[in-house]
Image (spheres, rainbow, N blue to C red):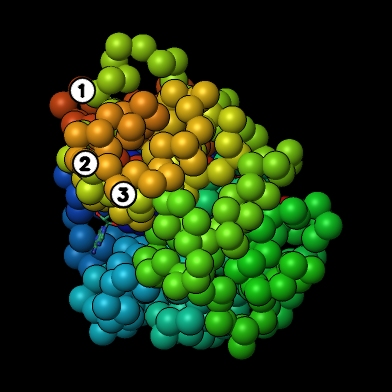
Amino acid sequence: MAALRVLELYSGIGGMHQALRESCTYAEVVAAVDVNTLANDVYKHNFPSTPLWAKTIEGITLKEFDRLSFDMILMSPPCQPFTRIGLQGDVSDPRTKSFLYILDILPRLQKLPKYLLLENVKGFESSSARNELLQTLGTCGFKYQEFLLSPTCLGIPNSRLRYFLIARLHQEPFSFQAPGQILTRFPDQDPEDLLNEEVADTVGETSSSSLSSEKKNLHPNIDPDCSSKESLPKRAFLFKLETVEEMQRKHNQDNDSSIQMLKDFLEEENEEMTQYFLSPKSLLRYAFLLDIVKPTCRRSTCFTKGYGHYVEGTGSVLQTAVDVQLESVFKHIDELPEEEKLMKLSTLKLRYFSPREIANLHGFPSEFGFPEKVTVKQCYRLLGNSLNVHVVAKLISFLLE
Ligand SMILES: C[S@@+](CC[C@H](N)C(=O)[O-])C[C@H]1O[C@@H](n2cnc3c(N)ncnc32)[C@H](O)[C@@H]1O
């Protein structure tokens, strides 16, 4: 049997390639395409034998695509046009141009690929770009299924709610196909098994495991996946600008034994880790807005590309002084002079997650690495743009079932 010929578009650091490998599919990535020089360096470092095309997708001709004779497309188009914090330019955003180009090329290929997998942010499901994608797939004869999934579905303590679409050419519908619905769990998961509040709250009802296309009014206060940056609810705050509801949600997540503890993903606390400690300035300015987790917690918020640079809403921070009670630090802290405030906050020993720890949560294996010249901030940026390898690997398996 010949290896499946895979085209990886918007390849970044190679999250899709890593997932393909994890799915144990007999496959070869015949080309990976990305314009980002730094991402390409990381890709080459990890997948040295894969042909990497450092060019824009819209710069690739139909002939060049045809020559690749690929069986599968894996792609994560830029998500800014569809995020809630972006301007939601959708199809009129210049960053969507390359994706529209792919949709234009697809029906004109000499040989259509048999399989396609797309990843994007929550928000893509209500875009015109998604409607154009579905229309093109329909015209070409693909059967498809859409999903909104987070790594928490797989017991990973990290929220990263993402839109996925898998499509197959000229075959029976998927056994789990749910026309007009966006699945919020994997097909082999029972709705009852999902104590997963993030996903349940996303659909606004605990018992449902799918989201009908019409029901797009997602819960407004729910976990900040990378695309949402809602202001905090204006209800009674407890200490640390958190409402009773938020505290309860976090408490429930931390007690959900179907999710692993963060400590399984952490590096050893040693001298090197001091570089990740929050600066006094960040502590004083942002302490009330931080999502603070301990190694025994079973949750963390989505790590975005601004992690380590912007403090608010870019990902959780780790409390390494585990015996200190948050409440004892934060209660009445506002009444203290700055110096004492800082002293109190410092007792928590708060640090950022290291790039390796984020890579662990994303499912990248320990042998996956970054070239030495890549700075910590650049690693955060690249990882923030990437994806959860385990989630995609599992979707690839369903795509090929
Ligand atoms: C969401 S990231 C994908 C990340 C990737 N899946 C990973 O695991 O790192 C989108 C990527 O598309 C690339 N990109 C954006 N527009 C492009 C274009 N027109 N042609 C080629 N690459 C593009 C960006 O440089 C970025 O690396």
From this view, report whether residue 164 is shown above or below residue 211. above
Residue behind mark 1: 372
Position of 283 compared to 324: left or right? left
Q: Residues within 10 Å of mark 1 (few under 14, many from 20)?
A: few
Cα gap from disc 1 to disc 3, whole angstroms:
42 Å
Q: Position of residue 370 (x, y in %)?
A: 29, 28
- Mark 3 belongs to which amino acid? Asp
Q: Which mark is residue 334?
A: 3
- Residue at disc 2, secondary structure: loop
Q: Are marks 2 and 1 in contact (CB under 8 Å)?
A: no
Position of 257 compared to 10: left or right? right
Q: Which mark is residue 337?
A: 2
Cα gap from disc 3 to disc 2, whole angstroms:
8 Å
Q: Position of residue 398 (x, y in %)?
A: 68, 54
377 or 262: nearer the viewer? 262
From this view, report whether residue 354 is shown above or below residue 299. above
Q: Does the image show residue 16?
A: no
